[in-house]
Amino acid sequence: MPRTDRLVEMIRILRDGRLHRAEDLAERLGTSLRTIYRDMDRLIASGVPIEGRRGLGYRATAAVTLPPLNLTMTELEALHLGLAAVSQAEDAELREAARTLSARVDAVLPEDRDRAVGWSFATPPLGDAVAGFRHMASLRAAIRARQKLQFTLRDAPETQVLRPLRLDYWGRVWTLAGWNETAQAFDELRVDRIVTLRVLPQLFVDEPGRMLSDLEAGRGSSA
């Protein structure tokens, strides 16, 4: 499994709030204990809210998000992209300024347990974030209007249909959760891996077993 995918999967596992041993994570992800320790250090250094230590275990703490009255999601995306770009500048002073500004923003964010959002600089390259932003307007509109999406993914050319339920943000990594009508199961995909996207005219309504509450209930009972 590529490192970026492994880190995203690790976040998905940890966000149930339970304590997970590094040994169990290594077995579940098919990697070494040393790699888990290294990945965990990388996630913590990136600003992902994780607590724990070697020999004890790790868990994600309460997720945070920006208050909607202060910044809109579009403004948050613009701010994040700007900070991410500056953080990779050759000017050391600008890089440090971007990181300290990110830390200040992070320090004033209130808790929001209904939306899993991680702020600051995470591990994937800037190009991944840019690739994800190109679909953001369509995805948000489809979630609000409850319209189905037709899409293909990088390395998975088959066309699939999804009922989009929620966008999650994990510091440069956006994921889209929903009910995959093609696979007849809940799915969570990285937005930057979407190659083609079409918002279908078909609307969907809540159905037992296919709602956001069902997805969350499934996460809580797993791991």
Image (spheres, grey):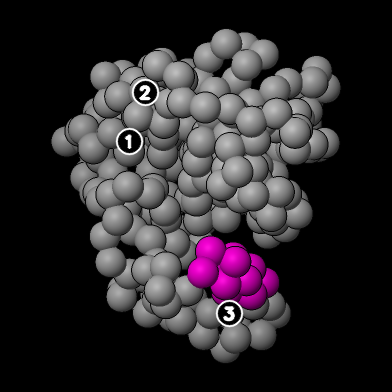
Q: Main secondary structure of the magenta part?
A: helix
| Mark 2 or 3, nearer chain start | 3
Residue 19 located left or right of residue 186:
left
Q: Which residue is mark 3?
A: 95
Mark 1 = which residue? 14
Out of 69 and 58, give the one closest to the viewer: 69
Q: Which residues are magenta?
A: 72-85
> In the rendered image, is residue 106 in sight?
yes
Q: Which mark is residue 92?
A: none
Residue at 26% from the left image edge and 19% from the top image edge: 221
* Secondary structure of the residue carrying numbered label 3: helix
User: 56 left or right of 133?
Assistant: left
In the image, what residue type sits under mark 1?
Answer: Leu
Tag nearer the camera, 3 or 1: 1
> What residue type is disc 3 on?
Arg
The residue drawn where x is 35% and y is 29% is 213
Query: Outermost residue, left direction?
Result: 56
Q: What amino acid type should be assigned to the residue bearing mark 2?
A: Asp
Q: Which x, y percent locates residue 75?
A: 57, 72
Looking at the rendering, in which quadrant would you find the C terminus?
top left
Image position, residue 50 (x, y; %)? 30, 49
Task: Report if the CB atoms under discs 2 and 3 are less than 8 Å apart.
Answer: no
- Residue neighbourhood size for the residue with mark 3, other residues' Cα within 10 Å, grouped as few (<14), some (14–19), many (≥20): some
Secondary structure category for the residue under label 2? helix
Which residue of the protein is positioned furthest toward the top in this rendering?
A: 184
> In the displayed structure, would residue 122 be above or below residue 88?
above
Q: Is residue 82 magenta?
A: yes
* C-alpha separation, residue under disc 2 versus residue under disc 3: 42 Å
Q: Residue at horizontal 51%, vertical 85%?
A: 97
Nearer to us in this view, 183 or 199: 199
- What's the mark number on residue 214? 2
Instruction: Provide residue 9's location: percent of width, then percent of height.
Output: 47, 32
